[in-house]
Image (spheres, coloured by chain):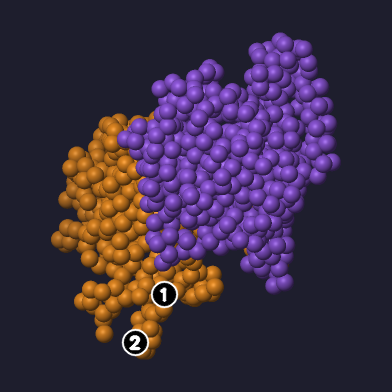
Chain colours: A orange, B purple
Amino acid sequence: MSWETVIGLEVHVQLLTRTKMFCGCPNRFGAEPNTLVCPVCLGLPGALPVPNAHAIRLAARAALALGCTVHGRSVFARKNYFYPDLPKGYQISQFDRPLATGGHVDLDSPERGRISVGITRLHVEEDAGKSIHDRIPGRTAIDLNRAGTPLAEIVSEPELRSPAEARAYLTVLKQILLYTGVSDCNMEEGSLRVDANISIRPEGATALGTKTEVKNMNSFGNVERALEAERQRQIALVEAGGRIEQVTMLFNAGSGEVRPMRSKEESHDYRYFPDPDLPPLVLTPQWIVEQQTALPELPDAKRDRLQREYGLPVYDAKVLCSERPLADYFEAVVRAGAEPKAAANWIMGEALAGYNETAVFAVEPARLAALIELVKEGTVSHQAAKRVYPELAGNGDSPKAVAERLGLIQVADTDALGRWVDEVLTAHPSEVARFKAGEAKLMGFFVGQVMRKSQGKADPKGVQPVLQERLSK
Amino acid sequence: MSAVAHIARAVNAGRTSALSAAHEAARLLRKADADGLNATLHWSEDLLRGEAARVDAHVGAGHAMLPLAGVPVAIKDNIVTTEQPTTCGSRILEGYVSPFNATAIERLRAAGAMVAAKSNLDEFAMGSSTEHSAFGRVRNPIDHERVPGGSSGGSAALVAAGVVPAALGSETGGSVRQPASFCGVVGVKPSYGRVSRFGLVAFGSSLDCISVFGERVDDAARVLAAISGHDPHDATTADRPPLELDGPRRDLRGLIFGLPKEYFPADLDPGVRAGVERTIGAIRDLGGSVKDVTLPHSKYAVPTYYIIAPAEAAANLARYDGVRYGVRRVGPEGDVRALYRATRGQGFGAEVRRRILIGTYVLSSGYYEAYYGKAQQVRAAIARDFQLAFTAQGADFLLTPTTPTPAFRAGEKTDDPVAMYLADIFVCAVSLAGLPAMSLPVGRSAGLPVGAQIIAPMFEEARMLGVASALEAVVPAAGEVR
């Protein structure tokens, strides 16, 4: 039998606020344990939460960027459960009246082409603290620095059909969230976390199968691996006549396997009810419009515009829009006078390699544009320009000055070219003979050899006439 | 002149010092403790002297007059203070000292008041007799065999015994008005949102109000004015300026007092009935009038209250888990679940455990709509009744008995929780509606105080207090009603 996989994702992202969701403590990763705490986030007797307006603003922007409707009235609710790193014994979240509902993420599925995946809801909540099991032998340590960190939870419809699609969805979602500046989406620091619901059903069926929840995946790659493992497990189980139980599975990145969580750890009745400490969150239509207006151009729109405005191929536009700084840099280089396609090539090659390592562009847009111009006007060859580029980092020298210093200014002087041509022809007598016997395609070989001999300094446009002249003798 | 006004005027004028007021308060506290009232949980003469020094320094420096200069105020021990423990009358918080002060405490101090003592209460403010304190029951100063009411029984007793002229209590469902009635003092519950809850240890957050006791209306009014007003630390405070008191009122001309018929059942204690009737007579004498009104949903108030308050309490008390502060007990299994079971099982008293269980039950999956959901609907209907009484039914205020009987005997209701809950039958509908209300002592029945309740529209505390002071001037609080 052929099986269809059905996946829905719940993504938690920490919001990039200065302070926590309901108190004034810094929202910061990596501090000494239990130093970023106060009576409110410690849940001390008598302390009360007050919502962080900026967190609401960021969550609303994320929702609007995902095409959701942001509601004029939403309600904070208490989600009750006991856990040592949950100071109040409940988490302040939203339940039946979330901040936003009904959006979508559009993406290129590896299997189905362009698809639109529904966003069920986006709500705001506070993070819990951290239980640390490996710090003190035989004991659990608790760090409450993270307690009260603002989170947006983004829940997708069960509309993903493969682990690869799930990964593609996450990639696009992360892109949008980074574009809007809502979160740094750093999975290593836990600022983006993914839980997945997955089920299988016979191809063509419409009813959903029993789902399991998969947790503990710390990278998009691991989400894909974990879902693949869980899909295989479910298929094998059902094909052997078994039944899927609604359980939570934990992914082990080391072994690549999923295993069920102990049932004792789940089956919660969270007893949600409206938090009486917090009045309903009321947002005016005007405020919502302001957030919409504050949104930057989003990846899809930017991609379309780059293709349209600069005549870039789809591939180039996609790469340049994968991160907002990349696209911004591209446009700055073009504004500084570079020809768009040449700028795209430089950025996707040299500049991107450096950016991936250091997260900055080492060469100012104007100097990259100047370098591109040197190639265009024939002052340096493309090859030579690639040697100039790394020398531009960390100083303010003009590309031309660097090319001069490195002796890379192209030589168009026929005498100089003639010397390199003669050396090449002398060194390759058999190729000369074959060329003369009619093997015209060897011209390319000779040009290449001359360029090499000149260490890129020879002007390729000048080399060919000299070669023609010498070879026709 | 009220005691609060008298002390503040004398201290501001330099005729006496806060220090001498502190010494007097300490003497009276010592006496109350010696008499066995068991109304205080933590106080010391050193701390009182510290409070006084602050006030005297301010007055000596010639700064602006302080409205409560040198006034000793008792504080219910569920309002956090940094200089004494805050136990909520519970073993689970024994010895707990808060690192911050409640907003109400900061405002009292800013007004020149002195924290005199932390007062005894029913554990986590759950009770109507102050017999549910882990630190022993409070005695009614008028008759030690009787309860002072609750849950703010310690504060009520200290005012009734003349130890302090005013005290802070807290209300969730009548916990100031009811003990005020039992002890023969004034008890004022403000509108929900009038006084910050920041630093009031939460019981039922949608109901909790820091409330005030006073010897006389003016004592309570001055303290309430000082602690009222918007607080950025409490998202549920109303965005209003602090309460401004009306000038004294001599007559009630043109005012209509609604008498809700549901609050005058046939089996109402005759002494209580006589007290309220005497008050009605006084209203007429002062030029006001009364009319019958109806609050048809009030009969559901007690059951509604005993769904909503425990539901919120179950969540609010989840934080007492022995992990971060307070008492920790380690269970035999040694894991974290055992720690919770042992800490909470041994740390909370029976009444608190009962309410946590009720609250957990009414919120649980499959029961939520039938209990909590329905209770919210009834709560809205109760609030609508009051609104109609003040609009369509034409009442300016409502007048009812505060309690169905005078103070009952200690032990009389401790084995019958429902009988205990019914002691709040006339006070808890007001809490569900969030309205301001107060209990005014209107006489004694066989020596026991009787209180009349005045209920006002939302945020009409100033008018309510003005009306009450006019009545207070003509109704002898200590006189027998029959």
Q: Which residue is mark 1?
A: A246
Q: Is residue A19 visible?
A: no
Q: Is residue A211 visible?
A: yes
Residue at image position (78%, 18%) is B17
Tell me the SS state at disc 1: loop
Mark 1 belongs to which subunit?
Answer: A
Count of marks overlaid on the render: 2
Considering every residue shown, the one lying at the far bottom of the view is A240
x, y (%) of residue A213?
42, 69
Mark 2 belongs to which subunit?
Answer: A
Q: Which residue is mark 2?
A: A239
B229 relative to B250, above or below: below
Foreground pick, B140 / B302: B140
**What label does residue A388 carry, if any?**
none
Quarter containing the N terminus of chain A: bottom left
x, y (%) of residue A61?
35, 42
Task: Give the residue type that dot 1 points to.
Answer: Gln
Tell me the SS state at disc 2: helix
Q: Earlier in the sequence, mark 2 or mark 1?
A: 2
